[in-house]
Image (spheres, rainbow, N blue to C red):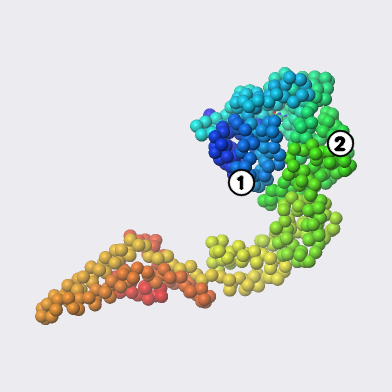
Amino acid sequence: MADYIYTLETRLSPDQLKAVTLVQDAAKAAEMNLYLTGGAIRDVISGLPIRDLDFTVQGNALKLQKDLERAGAVVGDSDDATKALLLTFKGGVRAEIAMARSERYDKPGKPPQIAPATISEDLRRRDFTVNAMALSLNEGSRGLLMDPFNGAADIEAKVIRVLHNYAFLEDPSRLIRASRFTTRFHWPLEDRTQARYVSAKENNYIEYIRSSTIGYEIEQLAYEDDPLSVLKVYEKEGWLKVLNPRWSTAKVDSVGLGALMKTRQQMNELGYAPDAAPAVLYFLTDRMGEKDISDLRRAIPRKDLVEAWKDLEDHAQQLAKRLAGKEAATPSRTWQLLSGARPEMILFLAITARQQAVAQKIKNFFTKWRQVQQKIPLLEMTELHITPQLPAYPKISNDVFLLLLDGKLRSRTETLKYLKPLAPPPPPPPPPPSAKRGRAAKAAAAAAAATATVIAASAKAKGKGKDQPAATPAVVAAKPAAKGKPATAKPAPPAKPAAPAKPSKPETPAKKSAAKPKAKPAPKKGQRNKAKGKKR
Ligand code: CTP
């Protein structure tokens, strides 16, 4: 049996995994059974990127809101009818948590009758077999996959199949969704589904679409990797005018959109993960009028997405202004400014900046300036003990990088000259192993005792007091062990930067003895004192 939890844990990003843990904790605290459902399971099984997380709980998901907000989640919307929360977790992780429900459609175009249900019933109300699976996240059954419609087989066969004959009539947004999934995955509709799709189009089922599902599908476009291809299919199929009567591919800034996707990809490769969704909507609707844009915005359920879309131009403008001003007068200051800016803003401005100087600075930030990092003399820094273990390392390496960026360190020699005074004192040799110390102490004590016995015996022979002189040699002999703190444990004082001049000598004997503690006998009294003297 496939280990879906293992697959899940290896496929999710660290931020997605954290979100799963937070939702699990909240559901557990509320004593609700929790399942990962829908597209996330499809994407886990098929090996495709996991874009968002859909959870289903047996119970009222709205009751988890406070706990999740406390854990840092932002609620983009909540729906009282389906008891669903639309959330964004740290790292831009999108998630939906909904109550397991049954839906009964009495009349086309009318909202379904919703009732709380079990997870099995919930899976029956879904759109396609590949989306109708659930993975248990509950103790006792964790990792159990529920797949009543054999969605895993359809993933294997790469087909989109509805669950039943009334699927498109009950929820005509499934027509739009079918077009979206076939375009995204390049998986065709299964034959009977295709026949139902054609018949639904001929019978104009789309007129029964509910406005709430229209908004949901507009929103989903923002998260597509190739939104223009999906939009073209929507236009061809007649779905685009359903989403908005004045929307067409002619209203799209396709050059801007293409540049956006390319720049996002480049940023991903550099380790940035900007949320491109607001900018995608911006370019998809570039040539639409104000009113049409506000209609689209009103329809979208995720309010945080709408706000980000609205603020895009203003925020990018502010960043452009800063980049054109004194704050970005030098490469290093520009670097610092851009490093602190939101990746979404950099992404958007990289494509829309009107001032050549601003565009060039962003370009340098992603290309030329990054190459300056190669000039940081890492090898020499290691030799100088300026390594990542050093608390000051991030600051030192950043300072060197910024100086190199501004051309203030023009050669390797200059860089090393700058670095040398920042080198820490050499690391102290490790203390001798404690086992040896114990043996040495015992040997010393035994020697002292023997000496004492001899002295006492000779004193006795000379007719003096038994215990008078015995103390002196015993104390001397026991001194190194009794002190307990060998000189080697003391770090060299930081005020002496000249210390690296002889870094290896004090280390060598200690290193040797640490490496072969058993091979060497305990040092003799004289040797220990000698070593001690050296270390000091
Ligand atoms: N769903 C449905 N009918 C709809 C909308 C959603 O049955 N009209 C169910 C599906 O099980 C779907 C899940 O709700 O998988 C989540 O919806 P959504 O996030 O829109 O779709 P995903 O399948 O997750 O697709 P995407 O990869 O685009 O997020």
User: Marks 2/1: CA distance?
Assistant: 39 Å
Image x and y of residue 223, in percent: 74, 40
Residue 225 visible from this viewpoint? no
Can residue 472 be seen at all in this image of the molecule? yes
Where is residue 407, by image quadrant? bottom right
For label 1, the residue is 70
Badge 2 element = loop
Q: Quadrant of residue 29?
A: top right
Q: Give SS at disc 1.
A: helix
x 41%, y 70%: residue:
488
Image height check: is 251 above or below 447? Answer: above
Query: Residue 504: x, y in percent?
Result: 46, 70
Most foreground residue, 419 or 327:
327
Q: Please rate how many residues cluster around mark 1, counting C-alpha atoms within 10 Å: few if below 14, some from 14 to 19, many from 20.
A: few
Label ID, residue 247: 2
* Residue 245 percent across, percent down from the top left: 87, 33
Amino acid at pointer 2: Trp
Q: Quadrant of residue 439?
A: bottom left
Image quadrant holding the C terminus, namely: bottom left
Q: Residue at x 54, y 61 (%)?
A: 389
Quick check: which quadrant has ligand 1?
top right
Q: Does the numbered disc 2 mark a residue whose Cβ is under 8 Å from ligand 1?
A: no
Tell me whether the residue at label 2 lies in contact with that at label 1, contact meaning CB atoms closer than 8 angstroms.
no
Along the line of sight, which residue is nearer the eye, 216 or 393?
Answer: 216
- Looking at numbered disc 1 in the image, what kind of residue is underneath it? Arg
